[in-house]
Image (cartoon, rainbow, N blue to C red):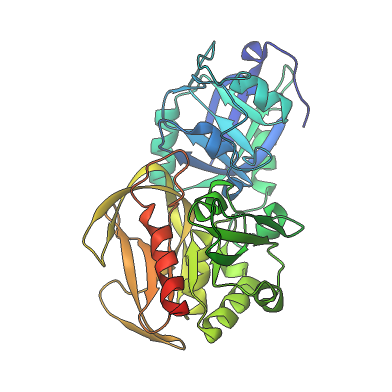
Amino acid sequence: MTTSTRGTSKVPAVLVLEDGRIFRGRAYGAVGVTFGEAVFSTGMTGYQETLTDPSYHRQVVVMTAPHVGNTGVNDEDPESQRIWVAGYVVRDPARVPSNWRAKRSLDEELRHQGVVGISGIDTRALTRHLRERGAMRVGIFSGHALPDEGTMLAEVRQAPEMEGADLSAEVATKEAYVVPAIGEKRYTVAAVDLGIKGMTPHRMAERGIDVHVLPATATAEDVFAVNPDGVFFSNGPGDPATADHAVSVMQAVLERKTPLFGICFGNQILGRALGFGTYKLKYGHRGINQPVQDRTTGKVEVTAHNHGFAVDAPLDKVSDTPYGRAEVSHVCLNDNVVEGLQLLDRPAFSVQYHPEAAAGPHDAAYLFDRFVSLMEGQRA
């Protein structure tokens, strides 16, 4: 992969899907070649948070909103230390960013970090294609001397698939660190980093929690060594069917009856720990506008999603598990996908979406309060 100089909008680029569909446009960001899984995100805002979400590792993100880059890039909103998407696809990039916090343009940031993208294509047609055919492997090729279509397609079909991909250790922290409580410290939480976003420990710190963020390779002994009041399992990329280590650590937490909260990948890990299966969705849920019902209250909330896999648990019955009774607590109103689990006999629950909600919405922020309530109850 090579980084371009200025003026990439005049450099030709081609997007090639593994089923042979081809889109031609112009380079956006770095010039070069990249491969990944083609997925689409329906958020109209928050592109900077999307780009820096580790859950997008090895994915080429198609933005359904036609105009992207309006507010440029700032130094306050990233969810991690780098851009994680494998490639970026937009229809109509902003020519000039306009925001008082902007430090540089999105195009400049993509070039600086070596992220290959494409602009000027019909992202609506591409999104419809992915909805009909499903998420699939894709390549973006840019430059003035491109291979022929047959060669590009062959390279795409040689790229690794997302099913069976074990990726959490590639994006997680290598060393443990602490995000201290804001104000008076009330609790200690061990957070297993499977691809955590920066806003997540911040939301817990706002509630008086010292958050010990641990690597994905942390053992149960590492988790209990911080003497936690609660344990958190984060979001992250890849296929949950490969996450045997995280499942075993979570089962050790469940055995001790320590309050437990998981989001996204953490929800899938809880599903597996309870004995449920997981499966790959046709095209997944990605964006900040997904309707979910909290079945424990009947409330419907608009939520932020980024997942291509889901838990296979029965929606309308209480299940017996090795750790007591469990039920589906949240469900997506678009397609009835499981969006949350809770144990009825132990202090553990999870959701499939992002309650830290950067860059919004904030309907699900109460879930952090629910986690605090579990820790309060256990301490009492």
In the foreground, 181 or 151? 181
Q: Quadrant of residue 74?
A: top right
Residue 258 percent across, percent down from the top left: 52, 78
Q: Residue at x 45, y 79 (%)?
A: 378
Residue 73 percent across, percent down from the top left: 59, 25
Report if residue 20 is visible in the image: no
Which residue of the protein is positioned furthest toward the front in this rendering?
184
Report if residue 309 is visible in the image: yes
Left or right? Give the position of 7 relative to 256.
right
In the foreground, 76 or 293? 76
Which residue of the protein is positioned furthest toward the left in this rendering?
298
In the foreground, 131 or 186? 186
Residue 95 percent across, percent down from the top left: 54, 11
Left or right? Give the position of 226 relative to 351.
right
Residue 148 percent across, percent down from the top left: 69, 27
Q: Residue at x 49, y 74 (%)?
A: 259
Determine whether 85 is above or below 8 in the image. Answer: below
Determine whether 41 is above or below 319 in the image. Answer: above
Looking at the figure, which quarter contains the N terminus?
top right
Looking at the figure, which quarter contains the C terminus?
bottom left
Determine whether 300 is above or below 375 in the image. Answer: above
Q: Quadrant of residue 377?
A: bottom left
In the foreground, 107 or 180? 180
Left or right? Give the position of 112 relative to 135.
right
Counting the numbered discs, the total is 0
